[in-house]
Amino acid sequence: MNIQSAINKEVFIPRDERMLVAVEVRRRKRKRMSFLPAGAKGDYTTFICVSVTNTRPHQLFITKVKKFGGSSPFTKRTQWTVEKLRQVNGINPNKDSAEFDLVFDNAVDQWVASSSAEKCIFVQILYHACQTYWEGKAGSLGKVGRQRRANQGAPREVGAGPSDSSPGSAFRTLQSRRKSYIPPRQTEFINCQSKLTGDACTMNLVIYRCKAFLNRMKNRMVTNHRSPSWGQPGQCITGSTLGNAVQRVNVVLGERGDKLTRAEDKTVDLMHKAKQFADTAHKLALKHSK
């Protein structure tokens, strides 16, 4: 079982929620805790997760989960609704980077993901989840408005008492409710690459997941190289042999990463060409229809 499946099983499934994505992060600027001695460093790992409730109406949450050293279960620390998430800052819109900021009503968290690919997966899934959530909420509000208009247009029973309001007063009441209603402010995504907040999301997700997998494999190889117990029992492995093996793995992973980057660029290029072709076809259709 991978880490994301474990977090979903231990933290979100018991709360009748479904986790969409989780990213391992660390702070760019550590907060100093006044009640801890100077130099104290907690042994824990932090994850930022996006989850949605299984019950309707669906609620979208951003949750901070931690795993402390020496303890197997994951611990839910803080949870925000998407209405409190004001801004997602991708820091650099021109290249893949591991840094991003989450701005809430009363807090600003500056994070660094374990890799740029992990951060891109997180931002892309969070963006489309927010879009789906706000579109669903707008649709539900429109449905309520249509139901109110239908009720007002329904014929009244004959012999209704004086307590029934006139059509004019009902219209004024509806107008006052519309004026008093303040639509919620949607989450703003700034400094994010257009490929994360645009089309072709499925292909980009596949590419980023491959990059994240290769990065994890590379980190695991480096960790095993540093570990003194690396290798089979009874096998004598010299430092030069380990160095050559790790170097070969790094070269192979680098070549595959370059191929994935080229595939990603080709995907974006094809997406733009398809859009231009669709625009041209639409213009030709309008021209011949006249």
Image: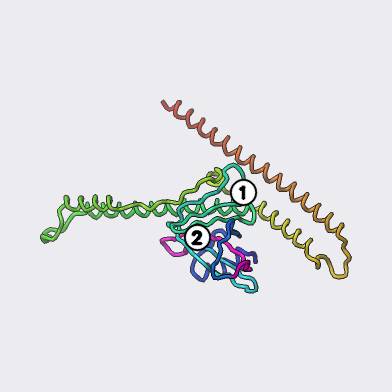
Q: Position of residue 88 (x, y in %)?
A: 51, 51
Quadrant in the picture for residue 113: bottom right
> Residue at the location (58% across, 62% down)?
47
Residue for badge 2:
62
Q: CA distance from mark 2 to mark 1?
A: 21 Å
CB contact under 8 Å: marks 2 and 1: no
Q: Is residue 77 on the magenta stretch?
A: no
Rate crowding at label 2 as few (under 14), some (14 to 19) or many (20 or more) other CA atoms within 10 Å. Answer: many
Q: Residue at x 54, y 44 (%)?
A: 199
| Stretch of the chain drawn in magenta | 37-60
For mark 1, what is the residue? 97
Mark closer to the chain start, 2 or 1: 2
Pair 2/1: label in front: 1
| Viewer-proximal residue among 181 and 27 | 27
- Along the horizontal axis of the image, is 39 left or right of 128? right
Residue 200 in view: no
229 left or right of 286 in image: right
- Seen in the picture, residue 5 relative to 180 is either above or below; the reply is below
Residue 114 placement (x, y as % from top left): 64, 56
x and y, in percent, of residue 49 in the image = 54, 61
Give how far across and how far down residue 109 sits, in percent: 52, 57
